[in-house]
Structures are given as C-alpha cells and as structure tokens.
Amino acid sequence: MFADIFAVLAPVFITAGLGYIWARSGRHFDTGLVTSIVTYFATPCLTFAALATVDLGANALISMGTAALAANIIFVLIGWPILKIFKLSPRTYLQSLAWPNVGNVGLPLCMLAYGQDGLALSVAFFAVYVVLQLTIGVAFVSGSFSLQSIIKMPIIPATLIATGFLATDTEVPAWLYNTTNLIGQLTIPLMLFTLGVSLARLRPVSLARSTALSMLRLAMGFAVGVGLSEVMGLTGIERGVVILQCSMPVAVFCYLFAQLYNREPEEVAGVVISSSFLAAIALPGLLWYVL
C-alpha cells in the first residue's frame, strides 16, 4: 500500500517541485501564456478525449457533475455563516472555502490513483466546477457578471461535443482522438509545474488565520466528499474521485481572482499556501482511505 501511495504522490510532488525550484531560481516563466494554452487548448482537448471515449457510461459522468454542483453549494452554505460569525469578508474568503484545487492537483491524483477511468470521472467533476468558478464565482468576487465569461470558455463546447459522441454511441475518428489526446496530455504536467511556480511567487500574511481556514477547507472537503458519496450511493472509483476532488486544497485561481479584483490578495495567498502544505501532509492518509 505504501508503494502504491508513493507511486501516486511522487509525480505530483516532483513536477510541482520542479516548478517551485524554477521560480525560486529566478528563471522566467510566462504564467499568463501557459495558463492561456492550458485554458484554451489543452484542457478542452483533455476533456474531449477523456469523456468521448470513456466506457463508464453517461450515468457515471452525470453523477460526477451532480456531485460537483452539490459540493459547491454545500461548501458555500457551510462557509458563509462561519465567515460571518468570525467577521471575515465572504467576498475575500468564501472562494477559498468553496473552490478546491480540482484541476492542478485533483486531476493528476485521480488519474494516477485510478487510471483513465479516474481521469474521465475527475474531468467531469472538474468541468462542472470550472464553469461554476468562472461564471458565478467570478461574478461574486468581482461584483458583476459578464455573459462573455461563458462564451469564451472552450471547455463547454468540448464537453457538449464529447457528450454527443457518448450519447449516440458514435466512435470518435482516430485522427480526432489522437490529436485531442496528444494536446490534452499537456494539461496535467503544465498545471502541476505552474502550481509550483505560483506557490513560489505567493507572499502570504496572517499565518494563524490562514492555517485555521486551511484546516476548515480540508476537513470540510473530506466530510462533504464522504457524505455526498453515501447519500448518492457511490462506490468504487466514483466514490474515491468525489472524496479526492472535494478534499483538495484551495485553488490557485482564488489568489488570481483576489489580486485581479483587489480582494486582499495577500490574505488569500496565505490560505492557498497553507492549505497546499497541509494537504501535502494529509494526502498519504487520504489516499490510504480511498484506495
């Protein structure tokens, strides 16, 4: 079991660690360019290739999407009153409690733990979360909503096209699968490397508050993941993917949005870093639980 867990975690930590070392050594890394490549090309291709050819059936993918939506709602319902009780701004901190890092960390963990089936299920979870995060989430943090934010998300047509192939039981042409699969393979290593670079560049403050919120994020995520799995009757890989995705640390996007919309970015950076550190400590136990 130790060897299995190490085999899952080692690629994640090593790849993110390389990004961290790269940034700390002062080397240039164009985060904006890499993020654009991942957002507009690699992730849609990964989504299509993973979903259109999966043998799990539409019901399993729908369950993942439902779990993602339900988890986000529950995180908000739990996080909002807690922040109000401790007189912390929901516009600053709620995103840190509601948005786990289902992309940079969640996708590679699920793929390494469960193979291609795990990747497909985690992509379905991720796709729903990305749409929520980049529409309702951004609108909440910024205070305004733009329809262009939905139109500009290529992951949506990629998901719809893949669903069409899946629903009609149509075989994906070899050239199309090979192309999207090849480009999609950029996603996970680039995400992990960029995660390491981002963590190296963050400058946190308020360590005690950041640690407390990080512990809440991880504990709440695990509890909600287990609870949803029980309520929805999920077993096997589906159960493991939901628990893993819900239990991820705070998404780096939370810091980017806080910086973009001036929502105390240093405070959010502290939660991102401390939750990532605590998650790294907790991941062996989490994997032992789900495997």
Image (cartoon, grey):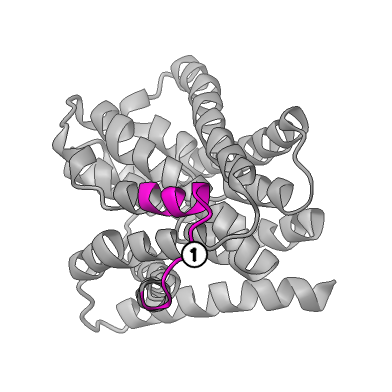
- Drawn side of residue 109 relative to residue 254, left or right: right
* Along the viewing direction, whichever of 249 and 146 lies nearer the viewer: 146
Q: Residue furthest right?
A: 1
Q: Residue at x 24, y 60 (%)?
A: 40
Quadrant assignment, res 10: bottom right
Magenta highlight on residue 163: yes
| On screen, residue 277 above or below 215 | below
Q: Main secondary structure of the magenta part?
A: helix
Q: Is residue 110 visible?
A: no
Residue 136: horizontal and vertical position, in percent? 31, 29
Residue 135: horizontal and vertical position, in percent? 28, 34
Q: Residue at x 79, y 45 (%)?
A: 235
- Drawn side of residue 207 relative to residue 78, left or right: left
| On screen, residue 39 above or below 159 | below
Residue bounds of the magenta highlight? 160-175
Q: Is residue 111 visible?
A: yes
| On screen, residue 79 above or below 134 | above
Amino acid tagged 1: Glu
Residue 286: horizontal and vertical position, in percent? 73, 55
Q: Residue at x 37, y 46 (%)?
A: 160
Q: Which residue is mark 1?
A: 171
Quadrant assignment for the N terminus? bottom right
Look at the numbered disc 1 and give the secondary structure of its residue. loop
* Along the viewing direction, whichever of 115 and 224 lies nearer the viewer: 115
